[in-house]
Image: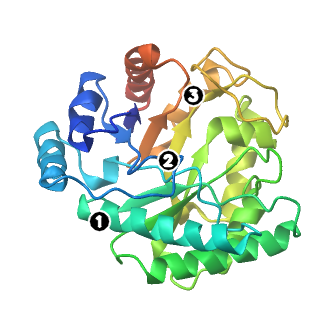
Amino acid sequence: MKYIGAHIDCPSDLAEAPLLASQLGATAFSIVLKDPAKWNFQVLPDGQAQAFRDACALHGFSAAQILPHAGFVVNLCSPDPRKLKLSRISLSAEMTRAAELGLTMVNFHPGAHLKQMQEAEACDLVAESLNKVLADSPGTVTAVIENTAGQGSNIGFSFAQIGRIISGIDDKSRVGVCIDTAHGFAAGYDFSTEEGYHALWDEFDREIGSRYLRGMHLNDSQRPLSSHIDRHAPIGAGTIGAAAFRRLMHDPRLDGIPLILETPDAARWQAEVAQLKAWALEYS
């Protein structure tokens, strides 16, 4: 079964997210656990964690259908010692909050080396950081690495880089991967053709391993293949094209994991969810 949904913005009350997702016809969703652009971490209001759990149960969402997104300030290979420490503390706190909410995954961007180190060194520093984060957070929560477009000095744009990070993790049972289609396309992985599609998954299996796939972000791209520029577009309105997303919905590798829209026009999400679900029904 395909779990299809969108990123739900409800910063003042997380307990609203399951209702808003259900109103889209979604069977999955993503949220942020705090203000993604700030380091500070507010305590949840009394009762909100239980209200979130209750709302998830009411609207039929299990932890397997929810992939929260960590803050954008997290940089696990920052060359600045202060920001590196804050990044580790912040991600650990978000994973702790996820456990409080009954969730089992937190998705994050690995970071940017700001041209202060080599890519391999940056990957190893992300792995070192993750080992510290995992040691300081509940064992029920998995850290999910999101691929990047390779814009600027961001790492994690190649499957080989992600594989190197995972190879340095002590407890590999607590790490996973989320593939963003727009990021992957910008990084050179051609979702738009059948040949490219099969080739990219072959590389994923070789460099990372299919067992680590925990979710996907479904976004078309405004920019061309290998642009290394992260610009999302509505499904079928970009350079990846609708046929690629139909192909994804027919792929059994994507069964049972959250498939999250982050396309730029929220007014289109209900229609996009419906279209993706229709394509998934063709496969089933």
In percent of width and height, residue 134 lies at 47, 78
Q: Amino acid at mark 2?
A: Pro
Nearest the viewer among 137 and 202 is 137
161 left or right, relative to 281: right
Nearest the viewer among 91 and 226 is 91
Q: How is the image coloured?
A: rainbow
Tell me the crowding category of disc 2: few under 14, some 14 to 19, or many 20 or more residues within 10 angstroms, Cα based: some
Q: Which residue is mark 1?
A: 99
Judge depth for marks 2 and 1 and give the one in front: 2
In percent of width and height, residue 233 lies at 63, 22
Circle 3: element type? helix
First in residue order: circle 1 vs circle 3: 1
Image disc number at residue 36: 2
Q: Residues under labels 2 and 1: Cα distance? A: 18 Å
**Picture residue at 74% right of the left edge, 77% below the top:** 124
Q: Amino acid at mark 1?
A: Ala
**Picture residue at 51% right of the left edge, 17% below the top:** 265
Q: Which residue is mark 3?
A: 245
131 left or right, relative to 100: right
- The quarter of the picture where residue 138 lies is bottom left
149 left or right, relative to 6: right
In percent of width and height, residue 263 lies at 54, 26
As drawn, 229 above or below 105: above
